[in-house]
Amino acid sequence: MDARSIIMAVRDGAGLAPEAAAWFARGLADGTVSDAQAGAFAMAVLCRGIGAAGRVALTEAMRDSGQVLAWDLPGPVLDKHSTGGIGDSVSLLLAPALAACGVYVPMISGRGLGHTGGTLDKMEVIPGYKALPGTAVLQKVVAEVGCAIVGATNEIAPADRRLYGIRDISGTVESIDLITASILSKKLAAGLGALVLDVKVGSGAFMVEMEDAKALAESLVRTANDAGCHASALITDMSQSLGHSAGNALEVLEVMETLTGSSVNEALWDVTAALGGELLCLAGKARSLDEGAEQIDAAIETGRAAEKFGQMVAALGGPFDFVERFPDRLPAAPVIVPVAAPRRGHVAQVDARALGEAVVRLGGGRLVATDRINPSVGLSGLAAIGEEVDPGEVLCLVHAPDAARAERAAAMVQAAYVISEEPPEEPPLIHGRIG
Ligand code: URA
């Protein structure tokens, strides 16, 4: 077998056989396949497609290009993947809530790039927290605590890491086949028994249109199931920030307030419970979605999820008293500026992507992968669609490193909000389910 004939077969619409996928993925990982060949392969897949069987073959081949974790635990091993959004800190609530329900969650997460935030960046706001502890520590913490939110090692799906870097510079990111194989190869390498996909739709999402979100959700669910991992997906709303805050430390603060009950964000909680309900059902730990969601509700309400969060933080190098002392442990920005509503009315529309970009410009996100981020900056108290505002009333607070950047971000936020006289229809939190 050779790269050229595999690329030509895909180019000519013949799909991708499992042996060819395995050869190509190995070649990506060990360097036998050149950058030019990888780019040509990605373009052939994008233009011709590889069909359902090809997606499974590529997913399994990229999963097997590196380490695949094996678990020997007294309960199911589960995880969630989100396609990313603004103010989406569901992972930080869901992992400990699931652990409190008696399941195991090796949550291998990524960093933020572009307008969406990244789970690892949020966890690293916690002083001392080691987000890259390696496989042995991940397995120990998952076994002892029930959950660990960490980054992938270089050994997880190395073929995907190489191909993703090449897709990024060759105009081939937007292929449902490649996106599916990329997301699932990493998740399935964690040795999961079940996976729930949170596919976001709306102005702040990777998939802005419902048709595209649905196609991706269907592809992810079908491919994961065909690769032997029980899966379902929720299509959730990203036409505005999910949380009231966007920015790393501000989102951790919001999560901790919700976990400890001092100030609950209902949207964040409800999406967490719905996704958790899906997983507990898939894993046979709940008889219905509602029963699963109730188990997650109970885990948060009783403080058991907060306790698990605290244990995870301590086990991964963070402070032992984080749950009790979180307001003192999080970095705060030196300048806080309110953004005023320009006129009386209702929040009718929000350009969520522009909010994410305001956070990036404040220094809270990355334009390129090597950028360092400022964890303390962002937006808090974001007004939601449907909220009534008076002129001058605060749409949100900008947390900035200096006055000049605060002013620029405030202008971006103001431009992102559309205020109407009539109350708008409020978007549902969950648009659909694929299972
Ligand atoms: N996230 C991934 O991990 N891969 C993609 O291709 C797109 C989003």
Image (spheres, rainbow, N blue to C red):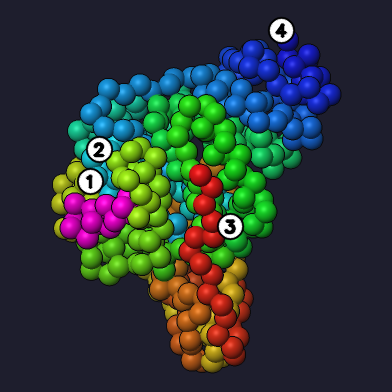
Q: Which mark is residue 1?
A: 4
Q: For mark 4, does the 10 Å Cα neighbourhood hold few (<14), some (14 to 19), or many (20 or more) residues?
A: few
Chain-order first, disc 2 or disc 1: 1
Q: Disc 4 to disc 3, how far (Cα)? A: 40 Å
Q: Is residue 397 magenta?
A: no
Q: Quadrant of the N terminus?
A: top right
Q: Are marks 2 and 1 in contact (CB under 8 Å)?
A: yes
Chain-order first, disc 2 or disc 4: 4
Q: Residue furthest right?
A: 12
**Which residue is nearer to you in this view: 183 or 86?**
183
Chain-order first, disc 3 or disc 2: 2
Name the residue type under label 3: Val
Name the residue type under label 1: Ala
Q: Is residue 303 magenta?
A: yes
The response on whether ligand 1 sits within 8 Å of label 3 is: no
How far across and how far down the image is residue 415, in percent?
A: 61, 76
Instruction: Identify the residue position indicated by label 1 in the image.
Output: 100
At a point 18% along the width and 58% down the height, the residue shown is 302
Highlighted range, magenta: 291-304
Principal secondary structure, stretch drawn in magenta: helix
Q: Secondary structure at mark 1?
A: helix
Instruction: Identify the residue position indicated by label 2 in the image.
Output: 146
Q: Which mark is residue 201?
A: 3
